[in-house]
Amino acid sequence: MPLQLNRLAVWVLAWCLLGTIGAVVLARAELGQLRDAFETDARIVHRLLSQRVVQHDAVLSSLALLQPPAGPEPRLSSVYPQILEVKRREAGAQWSDQALVQAEARSRALKRPELASMDLAAGRYVVVNAADPASFALRLDLRQVVPWAEWPMDPQTSSVRVRLAHLGQEVTLQPGQIGSGGWSFAFEKHLAAESQPFNVLAERHVGWAELPWLRMLAWCALVAAALAALRALLGQQEQRRRAEELLRLGQVARLNQMGELAAGLAHELNQPLTAVLANTQAAQRLLAEDPPELETARGAMVQAATQARRASDVIARLRRSIDPSTTAPLQAVNLAEAAAAALHLLAPRLQGQHVHASVDAGEPVLVAADPVAVEQIIHNLITNAIEAMAATAEAGRRLTLAVAREGAQGVLSISDTGPGIAPDALPRLFEPFFSTRAGGLGLGLSLCESLAARMGGQLIAGNHTPTGAIFTLSLPLQSTPS
Ligand code: ADP
């Protein structure tokens, strides 16, 4: 049924929405954690490298201070493997390399070691410190500067790329894995040594595969399970409501049928009352005779009085049970809505009997009626149709409720694909106690007809082609306030 499909679509939509929101939250949390871890690692890398390069300044200052005697250079490389060579300019001598000459001049002016030259692609650079009498310079290997033992990442497998860059040159210390798509984190900071102002560049690429798919899927499954449970719970509540509504309708039907029963019985009582009348008239005649037939007349009167009392008791009791003042005031009833509500109420039964039901309605048709009575009539007619189609092949069981406007009347027709109504049954259909069903009371249609008449409408029965019965309920249109 399209209504059920729509409802399912709403549930699926809710699942998609909640699933997506949860998955996005989980993914963002994971990305946040990865970013924090990356930034922590990058800061550690910066600190470690800064500590190392600062040592070079310290070594140069020590050399300047100690002024070790010329000769074999101190074997510093055994302590600092990154120091490839210690260069020395004796007092009065000049560096052979022009870059060293200029850097020493800068160093003297700034009173701190200065970068003389670099070949970052090869990871080499030279730092010089101006001193007297001799100045010293260190040729260094950047790759040996990295303290791998204290390094926060596994340089072979880590996804983080670490480079040192200066003036357009750069050296990669850790290759990392930089892919395309996904997210990128970046860190950039100068080493904390003015003599070696290399920029530490760290990058981390997070691919789609690194998102917490398992947790995201688990969340989606959890949402699906929770929504399914909620749906089942709501379904149960709906079923309970439907059962209560059916019970209420049943009670209304019983009450109304009691009224019908009373009407039927009143009709049945007509006969004895006529007999009572005949008895009293006979007694009157007997008394008028000369001499009056007193004994016979008394007997007739006693009989008449007994029957009349019993009959009047019955009628009084029945009258009390059919109180016309209980007729509900008329109000605007939307016929298509009433039809859809009745179908909804009977949906489980229609499904159980494999009846394909549909409402055919155009623009809204509002009639002036008692909603409970209209509901009762439609309910009875649908129930009859379902029963009538029991013998029809399952695939051919069709129930059509059509709403239309005809003059000053709103019309609801209910047609089925059952066997239809036999021609001899048609004129008697609305008589109380007329039934062709085994166990049928024969009060349903007569009740529907009198309910319709009470609201100023009518109910007509007929057959339609190729097969099936059609009941047409007409009710006065709700007059629009002018
Ligand atoms: P009951 O259902 O107790 O027999 P109703 O007054 O509702 O009493 O119906 C009276 C009779 O009208 C049914 O016994 C049946 O013969 C006939 N009838 C009612 N509805 C249909 C229908 N849709 N198709 C064929 N016959 C119907």
Image (tube, grey):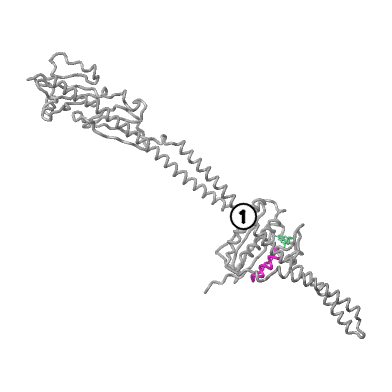
Q: Is residue 424 above or below residue 312?
A: above
User: Is the residue indicated by label 1 positioned so its CB lies within 8 Å of ligand 1?
Assistant: no
Residue 19 among magenta residues: no
Decide which of 254, 92 is in the foreground and name it: 254
Decide which of 182, 50 is in the foreground and name it: 50
Q: Is residue 431 above or below residue 277?
A: above
Q: Which residue is mark 1?
A: 242
Magenta residue span: 446-462
Three-letter amino acid code at the position of disc 1 = Arg
- The quarter of the image that holds ligand 1 is bottom right
Question: Which residue is situated farthest in the right direction here?
Answer: 291
Image location (x, y in percent) of residue 27: 41, 39
Residue that appears at 59% across and 49% down: 236
Q: Is residue 295 above or below residue 16?
A: below
Image location (x, y in percent) of residue 177: 35, 30
- The reply, left or right, for residue 154 in relation to residue 238 is left
Question: Which residue is situated farthest in the bottom direction here?
Answer: 290
**Residue 439 is drawn in which quadrant?**
bottom right
Q: Is residue 441 above or below residue 156?
A: below
Question: Which residue is situated farthest in the left direction here?
Answer: 92
